[in-house]
Image (tube, helix red, strand yellow):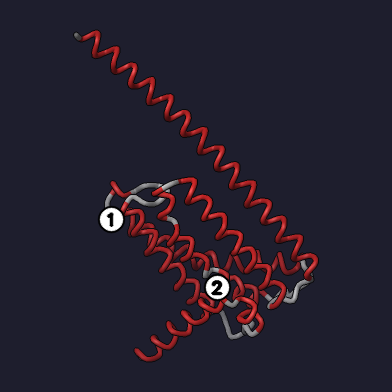
Amino acid sequence: MMSNVNFEINKLLKESQETLLNPKGYFSTMPLSGGFTEPVLKAVFYGTIAGLFAMLWSMLGLSMGGFGGLGGAVGIMVLIWSIVGSIIAVFVGGAIMLLISAICGGNTDYEACVRVYASLMVIYPIKAFLAFLYGISLPLGSTVGVMVSFYAIYLMYLAVLQVLKGKESTIKIVAIVLVALVTIGFFAGRRATKTFQDYSDQFGEVRTEYSDQIRHAQV
């Protein structure tokens, strides 16, 4: 029993490495059938690793939310939600992949699309691991995050092209649209962050001035 578990984990690790480092080779031989158990287990595997990283960063106060001061309970909830969310995501993502594949004239078999999306979820642990950068510097975290998103779009492009056999010209258009949306979201987020920081600075100055006035009045 233990050997089977070790085999499955080793298989998942090898497939994850191939997906990230040799996506063309992996997607060219990826199986499209065999049931939903394998893609769900793969999604849970990625969701668990991503959740562990998210829990660690939240407990250390290095996440975007900065929940470190609220104790380990929040971190555990983050882990649980990551696992549950990964199961939901693989089926919802499969439907999204089916829609994209249909637009591109590719395979519209739902199981095949779920399997593709489960493989693309390899990006989840990567993003979760790098999320500590948000706690160090929000602009740095955002920049690295958008770069990871670009690579995820590249993986999606290869998957639809090689696995689902979509039309390359249409896939390129879809990929360009997604890149544009991510880029717009990135700059919009940067602008919103700067606005928030400016208001925070102004509020801090007003609060300091008000405190000084009270202090002088008491004297």
Image quadrant in which you'd find residue 89: bottom right
Q: Position of residue 113 (x, y in %)?
A: 64, 73
- Residue 95 visible, this orientation: no
**Label 1 amino acid?**
Gly
Residue at (50, 71) in percent of width and height: 43
Residue 4, percent across and down? 40, 90
Amino acid type indicated by mark 2: Leu
Q: Name the element at disc 2.
A: helix
Whether 73 is drawn above or below 153: the answer is above
Q: Secondary structure at mark 1?
A: helix
Looking at marks 2 and 1 on the same chain, the residue that comes earlier in the sequence is marked by: 2
Picture disc at residue 20: 2
Percent x, y for residue 146?
A: 56, 54
Residue nearest the observer in this picture, 55 or 25: 25
Say whether residue 124 is visible.
yes
Instruction: Check disc 1 and report the residue beneath it.
Output: 72
Depth check, front residue: 67 or 82: 67
In-image side of 150 versus 84 (left or right): right
